[in-house]
Image (spheres, coloured by chain):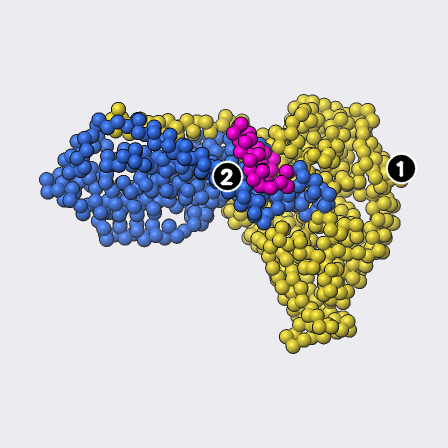
Chain colours: A blue, B yellow
Amino acid sequence: MTQTQSEPAAAGGPPVPRGRRRLWGPAARLTGRRLLAAVPVLAAVTFGVFAVAAASPFDPVQQYAGGGGLTASQDTLDQLRHNLGVDGPFPERWWHWVTGALTGDLGDSTALRQPVAQVIGERLGWSVLLCAVGFAVALVLGTVLGVAAARRRGGMLDRCVTSVSYALEAAPPFWIGLLGIWLFAVRLDVLPAGGLTDTGTDAVTAGGLLSHLALPALVLGVSQVPWFLLYVRQGVADALEEDPVRGARARGLSERTVLFGHALRSGLLPVLTLVGSRVPELITGALLVETVFSWPGIASATVKAATATDFSLLAALTALATVAVLAGNLLADLLYGLADPRVAWEEM
Amino acid sequence: MTARTVRTTTAAAAAVAVLAGAAACSKPSDSGGSGGGTDAVTIGVAQEPETLSPLLGYGREGNSKIFDGLLRHDAQMRLEPALATKLPEVTDGGKTYTYSLRKGVKFSDGKPFTSKDVVFTYRTVLDKKTNNPYKDDLAAIDQVRADGPHKVVFTLKYPYAAFAERTILPIASQADAGSGQDVNNGPYNTRPVGTGPYVLSSWRKGEKLSFKANPHYWGGKPKVKRFTVAVIEDDDVRATRLRSGDLDAAILPPNLAKPYEKDDDKRVFEAKTTDYRAVSLPSGNPVTGDKAVRRALDLAVDRDSMVKSILNGAGKPAYGPVPSDSPWFAKGTERAHDLGEAKKILDAAGWKPGKDGIRVKDGKRAAFKLWYFSGDKLRKDHALAYASDAKKAGIDVKVQAGSREVIRPKLDHDSMLLGNGFPPDPDFDLFPALHSSQIGSGWNNVASYDDEKVDEELDAGRRTSDEKARHKAYDTVQRELRKNPPYTFLTTIDHVYVVDDKWKGLTTQIEPHDHGIGAGPWWNVQDWQPKK
């Protein structure tokens, strides 16, 4: 990125004076506006969760009781229903939860027999780590391969990479996960098949964590690669056809400069949008990957919360996912504003 | 502030955030080295306990590792004293049970174990505010009180012969669990303190539970010093991790365990159970309530072929909740597969084959719906086999999947594929399934079976402590079941385990339907001895 300051003008980019743009003010205002907008969104989403959970055919009492629910007497089941507080109308329970959440009490998880805050605190870090590494893998792989493919469209590499991408787009992450376990853990025996540490030990060491993180992060990354790859490939290939690139070539700039300085730079713009919109997919993908690899993150809690109609936990996790998505969108918009001077944050 | 500095700052901030996140996640090590030898055992199970608190139902089947009960079962399922010094004294015609407690036992936090802990545990489980779905196990208790620090007296509402079997319930620490924390969601659920052979060292939910030997265990320090329970829901993944050497032992479906039978380094265990599968035949439906239909179905089902094809041979035919190899089984109540006899019974009762081959009586088709829990492949396979056998006798059974919430309201009219079984005493299965007082109570007696004679015998069986009289009562019940079977019992399934052949003297107990980490060859992992 070192040439960026001088390049755009030379490349015939938009004639906006660079370097003196005011950035902090508009960025802060954009963030503030988004924060305000997030409040009604979060309220609506959590309300929706309570409504859907209340409408779902699952009976929280049976889900709570598990195996015991099938042998318990009616008296015990009735008492449980009363104790769990799942009797009242859902708007009332939602209001109770929201007012509690505002004071910092997210309620208790019935499925896990723990306070919700504790459930999330214990697991969030591991999920964030997995998602961050997976996302980075997807971004790097997607960009590198995308550029390589765009350079020689229709070439050997391009055709391979593109068809594999379409295949991967269709493949569910858990299937890729099982394939990864089969290949790396069983056939080659180079990476552990699951967990956070070797099953026989509890100590989380940097080396151990790295080897255990490798496979799930790779699987999560690979399942997201196609979208980035195809976007980058398309963007860069289009940019290569455009006037600025032709101009740059005519001026005798090296192919390297043309590719990275001109084509990639404008070809990456749509990818920034993608960063924001892939966050929900990343979360869903992480759910499946965590389950396959026994990764102690948010995923298994989410699945449990959903099937057990665990209102408090479900609402908290959904709110968390919503925040992640909104933050992803905000980040994409901020980056877009940074990367493309034609875009004004004030107008977002 | 320029665009470039913002970019650089953002990148730096992002990097710092990721690093900080990773650092915050790392945990200090609390045990060294990895598995491999014989002093550490790692097992793979399909399901994780919801809680580790006995107050909410953990360990009610026994072998809880972290806790002890007043009594426990040996390999032959005979009761023996654990935290009690001997089997209870039963007085007042079977209504009073008195336990003398072991002295000098300490919880893993160093606090002494006394009668207060016992009373606390039982009273808390029975408390209305405690969300323990298994509290009906203790329904017979009227009150429990301490008689000095080393004696506990239970007074029952009625004489109950099987009560001692319930006192394998793990005893929680009053000093910890009773210190004012929330029983239902408090820390005791995840950081339990008990008197047992192992202490929980960590529990990463969804991944594994790690236990380490309790060096001060009153029963002697276990040879297996570390015991890890990996939670791996998917059968194939579990099998893969066993093969890769990540696990020392695992529970597996019979077909996945088969390849290990030829493996010299592994042993395959087929644990006997009371885990039955049966079809309820509700009295409220004119078809399934008809004695002739019930008897015909009982004879028309080919139990042997179900064991062979569905269970891969890991199981046996079932004729009632009591498995055919139990000492409580009424000899001679086995029913052979006899399609001819089934047809004869239906013919004689007036069920005549209609145009489509399905029998009809008084304009009513011999057809009913059979539900199973969606996603339960074992029950689905049983249901489909049942339907196909019934068809041969001219009875149309429509198999349908559903959730508990969908199925329960329909059970007065439709039948369902049940699975249950709790081994130590026949009362535990027979009473809830057959006694008329249990009709409409949760999922008990879903067939709405109401037979005065059976009620009487069931009452007699639980009230008298005379072994002979009890045997007679339960024999009669099982013979009545044959005359008018409100359920078609199909199979009793074995639970299959594969274990590295590194320890000697491994056994399995007779296992219940709900088998947590207390079942399997590792039920007594504290007694395992290395082979060398």
Q: Residue furthest left?
A: A251
Write the residue at 34% across / 29% down: A29
* Front disc: 2 or 1: 2
Residue B212 visible at all? no
Three-letter code for the amino acid on which mark 1 is drawn: Asp
Instruction: Give me the C-alpha separation between circle 2 and circle 1.
Output: 57 Å
Q: Residue B527 or B181: which is nearer the viewer?
A: B181
Count the numbered circles shown.
Answer: 2
On screen, residue A154 versus residue B385, left or right, reads left
Circle 2: element type: helix
Q: Which mark is residue A9?
A: none
Q: Give the residue number, with chain letter if any, for mark 2.
A: A46
Q: Give the residue number, with chain letter if any, for mark 1.
A: B92
* Image coordinates for residue B201, horizontal then vertical, percent: 58, 30
Quarter of the picture containing the C terminus of chain A is: top left
Q: Which residues are magenta?
A: A84-113
Q: Would residue A87 be counted in the magenta stretch?
A: yes
* Image coordinates for residue B50, horizontal then vertical, percent: 61, 38
Residue A150 visible at all? yes
